[in-house]
Image (tube, rainbow, N blue to C red):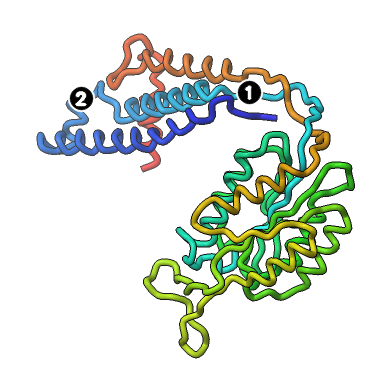
């Protein structure tokens, strides 16, 4: 397994385009200044020792050396020893509704963003538990297989939007079925499904799916997003709201009865999310009440440092760079590398 011990240093690579832009700008300015003195072709004859290609070559070498040094700072490593670890925890699959109705703003900032906040806090509270993510609207998809990689989990959660599922609807039953299958082989580990939805436009047998989960020993908790009185659904990038075929503004309402029935069928708890953290506290407490069992996971325990080759190559480039000047280098003049390149380009023209 390859990884960077300090991946935050890779953000320094953002300076490369800036340096390239500055180099191009300086070359353009230099060319303009030369044009003020006369014809560039005539001036080139008067400055036979000046090369148009050496500065570019030096710049490429310097940029490559900088990139290599940034990689060195990020500390590339290869995993060499994989071992099993057993820790006590539970397995949790989260089914998140990403239908358009989740953009309603009856809770702030909107239902979907609030749901993502609740999920983020749930993941932050996990230590040895496994977590997976299913997103659904008219169809259900696995967004993240069950894992102990909380960093990846939070990364996937932050990128969730209604665009992930093209077909609209609220297929809660399909989402629960997919969560059940995502747990894999039966084990003694306590398992739970957390469904986060507004329950609107329900279109399949969610109660039947919740009962099936309960029969398999999987508890189904439901977090209702929104308010029973509802709110209109904003259209992205506009000040308007979604309308039906008759031109009336669509008001999305929380189907609380449906959410409660799913939780009862799944032998779990229903809680409505609001503008405070009550939903997170209730669900977190319910998950903590589940019996913790041994969870086996495979991790890399030993890593070999791989930065040495990058550092060596960067030093070689910087060493060679010291022998290349904008003008011909007397110590390397016999090689005439750049002269040959210039003649070749002239023949091409």
Q: Is residue 232 above or below residue 210?
A: below
Write the residue at 79% across / 54% down: 219
Residue 214 place in picture, x, y as percent: 84, 58
Residue 313 place in picture, x, y as percent: 52, 18
Query: Gap between marks 1 and 2, in whole Å?
Result: 49 Å
User: Based on the displayed image, in which of its 4 quarters is residue 97 positioned?
Assistant: bottom right
Residue 138 place in picture, x, y as percent: 67, 70
Query: Sequence-wise, which precedes: disc 1 or disc 2?
Result: 2
Q: Is residue 63 above or below residue 266?
A: above
Task: Answer whether labels 1 and 2 touch (C-beta < 8 Å).
Answer: no
Depth order, front residue of 210/297? 210
Depth order, front residue of 223/97? 223
Left or right position of 192 against 36: right
Residue 47: numbered disc: 2
Give neighbour class at mark 2: few <14, some 14-19, many 20+ (Cα, 10 Å). Answer: few
Q: Which residue is mark 1?
A: 77
Q: Secondary structure at mark 1?
A: strand
Q: Secondary structure at mark 2?
A: loop
């Amino acid at each position: 397994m390859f990884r960077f011990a300090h991946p935050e240093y890779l953000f320094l690579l953002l300076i490369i385009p800036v340096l390239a832009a500055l180099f191009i700008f300086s070359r353009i300015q230099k060319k303009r200044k030369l044009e003020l003195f006369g014809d560039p072709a005539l001036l080139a004859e008067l400055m036979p020792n000046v090369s148009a290609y050496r500065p570019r070559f030096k710049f490429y070498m310097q940029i490559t050396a900088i990139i290599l040094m940034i990689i060195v700072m990020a500390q590339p490593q290869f995993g060499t020893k994989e071992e099993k670890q057993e820790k006590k925890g539970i397995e949790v699959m989260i089914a998140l509704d990403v239908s358009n109705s989740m953009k309603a703003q009856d809770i702030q900032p909107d239902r979907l963003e609030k749901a993502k906040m609740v999920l983020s806090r749930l993941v932050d509270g996990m230590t040895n538990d496994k977590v997976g993510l299913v997103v659904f609207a008219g169809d259900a998809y696995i967004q993240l297989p069950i894992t102990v990689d909380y960093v990846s989990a939070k990364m996937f959660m932050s990128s969730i939007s209604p665009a992930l599922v093209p077909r609209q609807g609220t297929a809660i039953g399909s989402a629960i079925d997919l969560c059940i299958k995502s747990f894999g082989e039966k084990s003694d580990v306590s398992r739970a499904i957390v469904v986060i939805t507004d329950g609107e436009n329900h279109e399949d047998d969610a109660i039947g799916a919740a009962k099936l989960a309960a029969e398999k020993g999987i508890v189904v908790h439901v977090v209702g997003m929104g308010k029973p009185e509802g709110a209109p659904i904003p259209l992205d990038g506009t000040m308007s709201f979604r309308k039906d075929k008759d031109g009336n503004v669509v008001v999305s309402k929380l189907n609380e009865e449906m959410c409660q029935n799913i939780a009862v069928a799944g032998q779990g708890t229903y809680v409505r999310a609001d503008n405070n953290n009550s939903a997170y506290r209730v669900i977190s407490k319910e998950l903590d009440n589940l019996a913790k069992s041994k969870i086996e996971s495979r991790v890399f325990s030993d890593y070999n440092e791989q930065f040495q080759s990058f550092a060596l190559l960067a030093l070689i480039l910087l060493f060679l760079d010291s022998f290349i000047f904008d003008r011909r280098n007397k110590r390397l003049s016999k090689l005439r590398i750049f002269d040959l390149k210039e003649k070749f380009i002239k023949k091409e023209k």
